[in-house]
Amino acid sequence: MNKQPLIKRIRSSKKYQDQLLSVLEKQPFCLKCNLKGPLVVHHKKEINQILKEHGNPNFEEAMKIEELWFESNLQVLCNFCHINHHNK
């Protein structure tokens, strides 16, 4: 099953956008190199993996998965460090 439309809906949600802003306000620099921008919020455990582990839920069910909203699963990286992380 292709989860991309669901992931796009999650990422477009107000709850998700608010969480990203909150994380960036708390840590306004890259965790790896201390650069202050441009920054992205990286998921240590990818959203699609979390969804898979919870039985490929629909949007309403996915939004209730607590693990999806754990700030401990997020880290702020600059674009360069984020690309390097995914190219390992």
Image: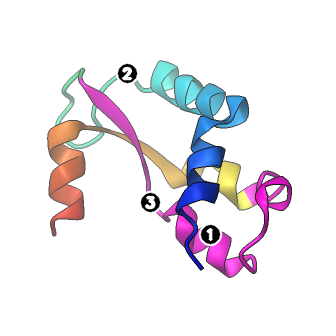
Residue beneath disc 3: 44
Residue shown at the point (19%, 51%) measured from the top left: 83
61 in magenta: yes
Which quadrant holds the C terminus?
Answer: bottom left
Residue displayed at 64% across by 46% down: 9
Q: Which mark is residue 20?
A: none
* Amino acid at circle 3: Lys
- The mark closer to the camera, 2 or 1, is 1
Give the residue at mark 2.
28
Q: Given the image, on which type of amino acid does mark 1 rest?
A: Ile
User: Distance from label 1 to label 3 (Cα)?
Assistant: 11 Å
Q: Which residues are magenta?
A: 38-66
Q: Mark 2 or mark 1, which has the lower sequence index?
A: 2
Q: Secondary structure at mark 3?
A: loop
In the rendering, which numbered label is found on residue 50? 1
Q: Amino acid at mark 2?
A: Pro
Instruction: Classify mark 3: residues with Cα within 10 Å, few (<14), some (14-19) or many (20+).
Output: few
- Dot 1: what SS? helix
